[in-house]
């Protein structure tokens, strides 16, 4: 990348947030698909239906983002999104033995809303100060960071779960996703937005 892009702190926060996004709630769909189908032995149709509330909550988070950014800076909304995602993933990690419990459902809700807040906020933070003629390169950097972080997280998840994953292994996986969300929250807290 050009020197102009390397010196933009907002872009640095953006691509790091993008990596943490994919390593946390971005990998949640893969992890929950394996959990429901391989460990809990649910069929594909049931698994798909169980994803419906999560998908709707992501849309709700996107809508909430629009309202929040009318009053707060995108970096603050990004921080709140990662905080919601981290809490939701932690609740999932501690309630895997009862996947229909209130704690598990609340975890799905919080992670979904966090997902919906983080995705637009990270691009707003990362691209706000980027000149128009550099937007393509900056966007490519953020998307590439997503792919790299996602590939690394999926590889780690596969190693942790092994051939026959038990609930202890699953708890470690969701705690790891939670840790990535916490890292994203710290990055967002340190983000300096261009005015």
Image: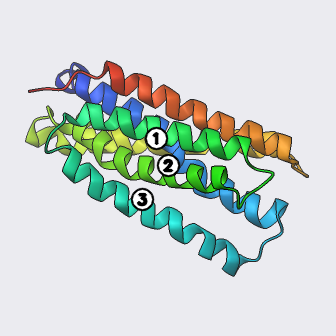
SS label for mark 2: helix
Between 158 and 62, the one lying in front of the other is: 62
- Quarter of the picture containing the N terminus is top left
Up-down relation of residue 96 to residue 7 (above or below): below
Q: Secondary structure at mark 1?
A: helix
Circle 2/circle 1 CB separation < 8 Å:
yes
Q: Position of residue 166 (x, y in %)?
A: 88, 48
Residue for badge 3: 58
**Dot 3 alpha-carbon crowd within 10 angstroms: few under 14, some 14 to 19, many 20 or more:** many
Q: Point out the frontmost of discs 3 and 1.
A: 1
Find residue 3 and report its horizontal and vertical position in percent.
21, 21
The residue pinned by badge 1 equals: 84
Residue 142 in the image: state x and y as whole percent: 35, 40
Disc 3 to disc 2, how far (Cα)? 9 Å
Answer with left or right where residue 4 lies relative to residue 64: left
Please give the residue where the numbered disc 2 appears in the rendered image: 110
Mark 3 or 1, nearer chain start: 3
State left or right for residue 79 relative to residue 72.
right
Packing grade of label 1 (10 A; few <14, some 14-19, many >=20) is many
> In which quadrant of the rendered view does residue 105 lie?
bottom right
């Amino acid at each position: 990348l050009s020197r102009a892009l390397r010196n933009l702190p907002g872009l640095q926060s953006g691509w790091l947030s993008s990596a943490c996004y994919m390593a946390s709630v971005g990998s949640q769909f893969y992890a929950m698909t394996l959990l429901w189908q391989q460990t809990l032995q649910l069929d594909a149709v049931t698994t798909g239906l169980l994803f419906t509330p999560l998908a709707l909550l992501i849309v709700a988070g996107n809508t909430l983002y629009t309202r929040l950014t009318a009053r707060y800076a995108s970096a603050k909304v990004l921080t709140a999104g990662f905080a919601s995602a981290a809490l939701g993933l932690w609740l999932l990690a501690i309630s895997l033995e009862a996947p229909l419990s209130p704690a598990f459902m609340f975890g799905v809700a919080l992670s979904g809303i966090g997902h919906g807040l983080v995705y637009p906020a990270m691009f707003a933070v990362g691209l706000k100060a980027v000149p128009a003629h550099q937007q393509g390169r900056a966007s490519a950097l953020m998307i590439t960071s997503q792919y790299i972080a996602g590939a690394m997280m999926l590889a780690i998840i596969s190693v942790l779960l092994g051939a026959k994953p038990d609930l202890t292994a699953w708890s470690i996986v969701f705690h790891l996703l939670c840790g990535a969300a916490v890292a994203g929250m710290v990055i967002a807290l340190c983000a300096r937005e261009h005015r």
